[in-house]
Image: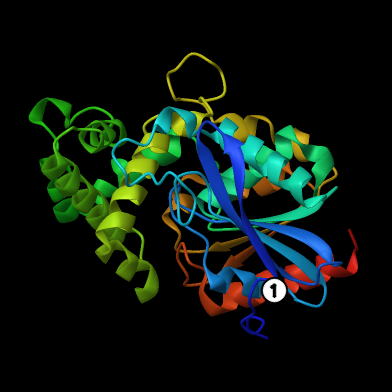
Amino acid sequence: MGLYPEIEPYDHGMLDVGDGNRVHWETCGNPHGKPALVLHGGPGSRTSPNLRRYFDPAAYRIVLLDQRGAGRSVPRASEYDTDMSVNTTAHLMADLERLRAHLGIERWLVWGVSWGSVLGLRYAQTHPGVVSELVLTGVATGSHAEVALMTRGLGKIFPEAHERFLAELPADERDGNPAAAYNRLLESPDAEVRARAARAWTDWETAVIPAPPRSVARFEDPEFRMGFARTVTHYWGNDHFLGDGDGDGDGNDEGVVLRDVHLLKGIPGTLVQGSLDFGNLLGVVWRLHHAWPDSELVIVDEAGHDAGAIGDDVLVAATDRYARAGA
């Protein structure tokens, strides 16, 4: 099956979302087709032309945006004086609503990858009337436990890389929350401290999350590397601005998204997950699927966080099927 052929946007713009931020958006495919929103990963990554290709351009009005601080949106997180206090999950969801109103869309399918799956799930839980379906891959829920796994738990599997990762932190911060500690370094007034921290963070990311060469190569761009590391650590160091679900701050429960999974009732969803995705060590996607009767879960054997060509086929089949369901 494969992805659809490459296409170009028929419209694009910069939307003023307040707080001094303008987000870049584009629309592709059929202007009168079923609306679909694409949420990139990260947090702090960017959209790419490849993401347009998961949809039949004759059937879908495909909407992509660069989230606050990322890609072509401004101001960029890579710039030291950018105010990150107005870059939270709540701000991003408000941006999605502003974009939906700006484009005159009533309901849309939401497609998300990695962090985009967290944002898509929470958006659907808090705005269920505007989400027709969810298609998610590299699924995560943004819980404290997932961050702890990625920053500490995987150190048992990658001990040498983890030792290098912790070594960049001040000695008195190596036993705490690595994401929060790295974020403090990335907010340092010293540009050299920020540069070393960004490199160390992305080196850890590439060590533990196997990815296609194009994804690894982007970290060689100093501006992208800085913006990505600053944004990821900003979110991971603050429980993705979701809290842990019970308000006691201990990070021990399953997280807000799994706690509120009942709010997805009536929204069809497709979850596509590589069997070797380290997030599976916590059973998150399995628990999400079994608590959400309207979802289907497809596990792709011998694939990681990027579900690969087989995962692409499953994702395209899902959007094709939902296209037939109408808006």
Quarter containing the C terminus = bottom right
Taking the image as shown, residue 66 lies to the left or right of residue 79, namely right
Three-letter amino acid code at the position of disc 1: Val
Q: Considering the numbered disc 1 on the image, is that residue within a helix, a strand or a loop? A: helix
Q: Position of residue 185 (x, y in %)?
A: 20, 35
Is residue 211 visible in the rendered image? The answer is no
Mark 1 neighbour class, 10 Å CA radius: few under 14, some 14 to 19, many 20 or more: many
Q: Position of residue 169 (x, y in %)?
A: 14, 36
Residue located at (36% from left, 60% from top) = 209
Q: Position of residue 85 (x, y in %)?
A: 43, 27
Q: Residue furthest top?
A: 248
Residue located at (85% from left, 47% from top) = 106
Residue 136, picture quadrant: bottom right
Seen in the picture, residue 253 relative to 179 is either above or below; the reply is above
Taking the image as shown, residue 193 lies to the left or right of residue 154, namely left
Between 50 and 288, the residue placed more toward the observer is 50
Quarter containing the N terminus = bottom right
The residue wearing badge 1 is 316
The number of callouts visible is: 1
Between 303 and 188, the residue placed more toward the observer is 188
Residue located at (47% from left, 72% from top) = 302
Is residue 298 visible in the rendered image? The answer is yes
Residue located at (63% from left, 40% from top) = 95
Seen in the picture, residue 66 relative to 288 is either above or below; the reply is below
Q: Position of residue 176 (x, y in %)?
A: 24, 27
Residue 287, picture quadrant: top right
Between 273 and 211, the residue placed more toward the observer is 211
